[in-house]
Amino acid sequence: MSLDGTYDDDNIFAKILRGEIPCHRVFEDDVALAFMDLFPQSPGHVLVLPKTPARNLFELDDAGLQALIVRVKNVAAGVRAALQPDGVIVTQFNGAPAGQTVFHLHFHIIPRYEGADLAGHGRAGKADDVRLAEQAKQIAAAISA
Ligand code: AMP
């Protein structure tokens, strides 16, 4: 999947947005949905995506991107407040050669903890659902506080 192409309505994030597949939700409004990454590179790894169909950064208009980045910041602030990491990575991949594997635009929020290793992008194992549910609850509470 290169940068050009057609949005696939059946990509996994489109299914999550339609509620056809469950997620550990941490935030939702009319602009964005944020949920726990099932394969976290670090504990507390969250994804933030726009509700508008867009394969990558180049396909969302400026107003949509402006609205989205504010949600990214607010969710990152919630992750920070809830999990007290020592640092936070915010990253985003466009096109398969860049590392993108799901072709609905999303930002990764990845907490970093002093002395703790980071799993490679796409190389982490699946996290325990009970733990993910706990983290989602903590982060959601911090966002709405
Ligand atoms: P990217 O490789 O940047 O497209 O990121 C896709 C991310 O989605 C990866 O970090 C995956 O671990 C994550 N992921 C894939 N399927 C799911 C899912 N069903 N629920 C939550 N996260 C997922």
Image (cartoon, helix red, strand yellow):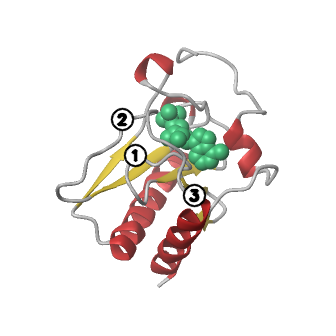
Q: Which residue is disc 1 drawn over?
A: 41
Closest to the camera, between mark 3 and mark 2, is: 2
Mark 1 vs ligand 1: CB below 8 Å: yes
Type of amino acid at the residue the image marks with label 3: Phe
Residue type pointed to by label 2: Gly
The tag earlier along the polypeptide, 1 or 2, is: 1
| Image quarter in which the N terminus is found | top right
Identify the residue at the far bottom of this view: 145
Which residue lies at the image location 24% right of the left edge and 59% below the top edge?
A: 113
Q: Describe the element under mark 3 as helix, strand or loop.
A: strand
- Taking 82 as reference, is 89 left or right? left
The correct choice, above or below, for 32 with respect to 83 in the image is above
Q: Which residue is mark 3?
A: 35
Q: Which residue corresponds to the image point at 44% horizontal and 57% vertical from the top-left?
A: 72
Disc 3 beta carbon < 8 A from ligand 1?
yes
**Amino acid type assigned to the residue bearing label 1 in the image:** Gln
Residue drawn at the location 50% of the way across and 29% of the way down: 58
The residue at which mark 2 appears reads as 120
Residue 123 in percent (x, y) is at 44, 33
Residue 64 image offset from top left, x and y in percent? 55, 47
Q: Is residue 19 left or right of residue 114?
A: right
* Contact between labelled residues 2 and 1, with CB atoms less than 8 Å apart: yes
Alpha carbon separation for disc pair 1 and 2: 6 Å
Between the C-alphas of marks 3 and 2, the distance is 19 Å
Q: Whole-percent x and y of residue 56?
A: 53, 31
Instruction: Kindly tell me whether residue 61 is visible in this rendering.
Output: no
* Residue 47 in view: yes
Residue nearest the viewer, comparing 96 with 65: 96
Quarter of the image holding residue 104? top right
Decide which of 80, 128 is in the foreground and name it.
128
At label 3, counting other C-alpha atoms closer than 10 Å, the crowd grade (few under 14, some 14-19, many 20 or more) is many
